[in-house]
Image (tube, rainbow, N blue to C red):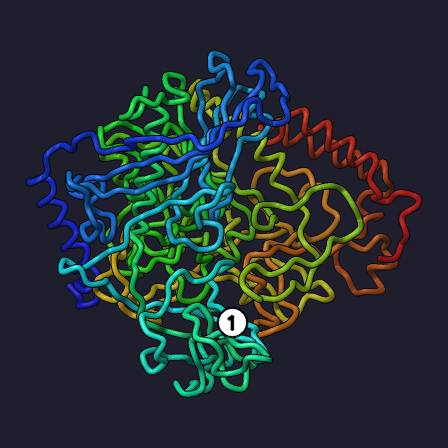
Amino acid sequence: MSRRIVQRLHYSAWVALALVASFVLWTPPAEARVKKIVVDKKVSPAFDGMSFGAAGQYETLAGRAFGELDPRDPRNALITDIRLAPKNAKGMVEYVASFYLVKPIDMSKSSHLMWQGVPNRGGRLTIVPAERNSGDIGLSSGWQGDNSGRTVPADDNEWLTVPIAKNPDGSPVTGLVLGRIVNASGVDSRPMIINANPVPYKPISLDTTKATLTTHLAETIDGKITEGPAIPSSDWAWAKCTATNPFPGTPDPTQICVKNGFDPKLLYQVVFTSQDAYILGIGFAAFRDAASFFKYAEKDDEGTPNPVGGHVSWVISRGQSQSGNYLRALIHLGFTQDENNRKVYDGAWPIIAAKRVTLNTRFALPDGAGKLYEAGPEGPQWWEPWPDPVRGLPAKGMLDRCTASKTCPKIFEHFGAAEMWGLTLSPTFVGTTADKDIPVPSNVRRYYIPSTQHGGGQGGFSVTPLNAPMCPGPNFGVGMFPANPVPHTETVNALRFHFRNWVMKDTPPPPSVYPTLANRNLVDPTKEGVGFPSIPGVPGNAPTGFMSPVFDYDWGPDFNYVDGSGVRTKMPPAIKHVIKMKAPRVDADGNEIGGVPVVLRDAPLGSYLGWNVVAEGFHKGKLCNYAGGMIPFARTKAERDANGDPRLSLEERYKNHDGYVATVRTAATKAVSAGFLLQADADRLIAAAATSNVLAQSTSSSR
């Protein structure tokens, strides 16, 4: 066995031995679970007193769930650092999670289906009117306990209070943290940002000799770094600085101040030692226990009734983007079974989620979005066991634990082009060797919504381009092309209909639809490979070099590379492998092939991209993270000929406005027939096309 594999298995073997010991020594807990709920605010009736279908009026209850975990329980023992958590007199680890319950006032009118939403960075969730019309119940509950951004406890968000790890002698647990500052200029100090929120950890000392601040002149998408000048410890400070309070400024552990100011041509990267390591993996157990309480309990330990007690027959968890990555990790780590051995989730819907959230590590950064030196794609990103020879890992799958406990939910997952190009989706389909399609198990349906940006666009039928999008991330820049309008909305409406029926009635949903190697719709992510046309205004050989790859990082020997758990000791990590990726093939217009039917995609007004190009700043000319784009068609043949555009003009395609409406009607009929569009939405789309400005007489021929 190679030294690399031995090193990778070192931490896993330690965890396995600990789990075996837990099984041998562990005795059933004293009902470890949510022990108490407190309703802090009740609005009844809610939603301005509106009535929803047969369910009638709704009410909302916002409150807190007080829970405890047995650290010896094998279901909890894999939470990183849980054995280093403070314990109560019963030897239990305590937490407090917020919750927000949306329910019919008259629970006898409930559908008995509860949607448990995973908040994205603390944002409070509810259920949409269509779900209220059906009598569904909504539960939003806290899982992210890093006290950063909107996860700080407040009245209108979701949060989780978790303990901080301490060594057995009571001393703080310490470790390395990496932060980055991009597109900064001037003398003002800057915070370290992870995606959209401040890095939640502070240096253990404000002495800059105990940290390093380096710079990068350039970074390629495949992780090659051009180093810039190192910043001497005497030339920067942990401090708040302004033009009137220049370097060295006022000491502040959340800000970095640089002597003579930041250079916008440089990316700044700091590595420092921190303490106060939140035990963030508790977020999986807290979320599980909230669902279990509202599904199964009649009352809490103090006699407070469960507001939906006896009325929940099914629970579907769902989360979008970061929250979908969280759900994938929850399933992978086995938090589908509660401490009383019961199945918690009947369905799970990770939405536009291509990897697993980084939560169960020491000094975790769950706000990460897949940028350089961010964890997340480690281990299996696929459902059933599959070989991983490139990274030297055993054949594993994300359903392994729930399969063993017989608690796997039915799963829907849907993605778009932005997840493929910007959010490392490819290995989910084809593994790290990218040479075979990985089978989708029978309890999973996969739907690919082609040519769409992250979460879909605003929809509609218009020849007026949208504004260019901001590239996601801190100061990442603006996109070169207009935003992509192709929506997910109507497709999701249809998927929701099918998912409810699958969970509640066992009615099979439409078969999975996504591009594969076998159908030759999954190809190399180059201009030639995907067949992207040469369109005026598209720089260079795009989209060649525009796919964010999966990096195989060396996080050190105390990291569990299969589970994405444990302790990362190398900051920044070395990149051992850049994983080979694939992308969907496109048609002559540059629109993707092989996904579910979508009306605007099938009645196009331009090329709809799952990628965009940064227009300015440090990342100029590179991938605009996971933003999408659109390149409109010319109106007339003369216009496209003048521009050298190979794509047919609107008039060549549709002749006139009525011709476009007819194409929309045909596309809508096709999508309804396939099960990916509800008839009511089809009628609405056709009506919208009829009143649109597409080839309308008043439409100007210029853009």
Question: Which quadrant is home to the N terminus?
Answer: bottom left
Please tell me how crowded label 1 is: few (under 14), some (14-19), or many (20+) other residues with Cα within 10 Å. Answer: many
Residue hosting label 1? 190
The quarter of the picture where residue 298 lies is: top left
Nearest the viewer among 225 and 1 is: 225
Question: In the visual, does 336 lie left or right of 184?
Answer: left
Task: Return the x and y of residue 211 as percentages of the image width and height.
Answer: 34, 78
Question: In the visual, does 206 lie left or right of 663?
Answer: left
On the question of residue 495 being in view, the answer is: yes
Q: Residue at x 29, y 58 (%)?
A: 362
Nearest the viewer among 318 and 633 is: 318
Question: In the visual, does 637 lie left or right of 266?
Answer: right
Task: Return the x and y of residue 634 as percentages of the image width and height.
Answer: 81, 55
Amino acid identity at mark 1 = Arg
Q: How many marks?
A: 1
Question: In the visual, does 85 lie left or right of 126?
Answer: left
On the question of residue 517 being in view, the answer is: no
Q: Is residue 404 above or below residue 2?
A: above
Question: Which quadrant is home to the C terminus?
Answer: bottom right
Q: Residue at x 37, y 40 (%)?
A: 97
The quarter of the picture where residue 187 lies is: bottom right
**Disc 1 element:** strand
Task: Return the x and y of residue 392 as percentages of the image width and height.
Answer: 25, 60
Task: Return the x and y of residue 582 as percentages of the image width and height.
Answer: 47, 56
Q: Residue at x 18, y 50 (%)?
A: 83
Q: Residue at x 69, y 29 (%)?
A: 682
